[in-house]
Image (cartoon, grey):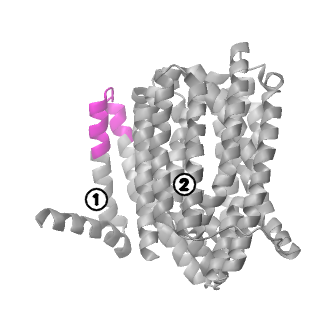
Amino acid sequence: MKNQLKIGVILSYVTMAIQNIIAIVYTPVMLRLLGQSEYGLYQLVYSVVSYLGLLSFGFGSTIIRYISKYRAEKDKKSEEKAFGFFLILYCVLALLVLLCGAIIANNVEAIFQKGLSANELKKMKVLVMIMTFNSALSFPNSVFSSMITANEKYIFRKLVDMFSTVLAPLANLVALYLGYASVGMATAATVVQFLMLPVNIYYCLRKLHIKPVIEKLPIALIKEMLGFSVFVFIGSIVDMLFWATDKVILGMLSGSVAVAIYNVGGTFNNMVMNLSTSISGVLTPRVTGMVVKDASKDELTNLFIRVGRLQFIVIALIVSGFTAFGQAFITLWAGKDYHDAYWVAILTMFPLCVPLIQNIGLTIVTAQNKHQFRSIIYMIIAILNVVTTYIAVPYCGILGAATCSCFAYILGQGIVMNIYYYKVTGLDIPLFWKNILKMAIVPGIMMFSGLLINRIYEIDNWIIFLIGIIVFTGIYIVLMYEVSFNEYERSIFREPLKRIIKRIKG
């Protein structure tokens, strides 16, 4: 199981590296083939249809929590009954998704006529229908993939993720070069989703030997699951209000071009978020097991700090590097038309660093079934963000939307949640920040030095940009290793190098 965990983390980072490489190589090609307006329309529809994911009602985390709980208790019968219950539930919810998607498709004119042209509205209707079918397919698929995660089969799960990561953009490029534009991309994504379903089903039934048992669950257990899920559901609504609603409001009031620029800025946040969640994601079943077995607050704090430090090392490199070189990168990569995407990224990236280096805290409070407060606070902050964004966009455009999100992140995910982790969950937050602030010295110096150098020497081609990134990364790694790493972190960095050197010599 330890090998599954270690290899799972490694594969997470390999998948992430592939995702980021593909995004860097594929996105500019896609932007030029689609055009700014069509790309904005595609992302707008994606944001609208993503609301249908809320119809899972927060049961995704519930599946992993209860399956992990039954595995820790070695209760195979309850595990299979829960599997059957969630599979039937998600198939019903998939039908509900199809119904709601049809309603949205028939009302796009009424909602978006102010921001979109007649041709865009017509194409949007088709895109909504295709993406709705994709979303419906994802519901039963998520049950099987959650079962695989809960059984800590990280190697298979990450290999499947890696395969789909590579297949999706390749299918999109084929569709684009054939001239099918955004409709072709939506269709390609749906085909990839369809291919993943039988793969996950086969693994669960044939390799894990877990079969869904269709039996009525005790009413008390269903109520307990609903009680757990309702606040996860609220959390999902919050995430949607933060990540999708800004683009929907921009589409309603400013048009598809504004959505395109805003989404390019958000792309870099997605990269950072993926870097952060790759470790905490594979630790979810392990944390649940620790909580079920009544791990002490000190044990949970040690895990919180250890994972947070590792996440900070990676995130601080990306954020400081992007701050120094991001403007030049966006100009070279996407074009001058996306200049404002840099400020969208900066305004949302910095406050997001706090919850991203602390997302193992969310895993802990979820496992403890103490996530209700977080969900309520986030909901309040998210609604405030939506209201202020709607007011700000007509006057300040995309930068107004990004600024509203920035203040919302700082207030809710930064200040309030740290107080909660300390007062209620029992995590030693002062000790955590003492660790992080000491580690932040090197990234801070590197970031301001990079900005100063960029003011003196203009980066106007890829060769100079790549040289700058390589030098920046090399200095960062050396300084962090010498100044900020503890012995555990040095060993993580040192051991793979020793093996590589040994193989080269051997």
Q: Nearer the viewer, residue 173 or 27?
A: 173
- State which tag comes first along the sequence, 2 or 1: 2
Query: Disc 2 vs disc 1: which is toward the camera?
Result: 2
Q: Closest to the observer: 2 or 372?
A: 2
**Going by the picture, which residue comes out furthest to the right?**
219
The percent coordinates of residue 143 (x first, y second) are: 66, 59
Q: Main secondary structure of the magenta part?
A: helix
Q: Quadrant of the C terminus?
A: bottom left
Judge the density around disc 2: few (<14), some (14-19), many (≥20) Cα neighbours within 10 Å.
Answer: some
Please tell me how many numbered marks the rendered image carries.
Answer: 2
**Image coords of residue 219 (percent x, y):** 88, 73
Q: Is residue 276 above or below residue 407?
A: below
The residue positioned 50% from the left and 49% from the top of the image is 272
Q: Is residue 310 above or below residue 345?
A: below
Q: Residue at x 65, y 35 (%)?
A: 46
Res 478 label: 1
- Residue highlighted by disc 2: 199
The amino acid beneath tag 2 is Val
What residue do we see at 69% from left, 51% from top? 139
Q: Amino acid at mark 1?
A: Val
Region of the chain picked out in magenta, as a range: 451-470
Q: Position of residue 22 (x, y in %)?
A: 42, 40
Q: Is residue 311 magenta-colored?
A: no
* Residue at 63%, 67% in the rendered image: 363
Q: Residue 486 occupies which quadrant of the picture? A: bottom left
Residue 32 drawn above or below residue 287 = above
Q: Residues within 10 Å of mark 1 (few under 14, many from 20)?
A: few
**Residue 374 in view here:** no
Identify the element where label 2 is drawn. Answer: helix
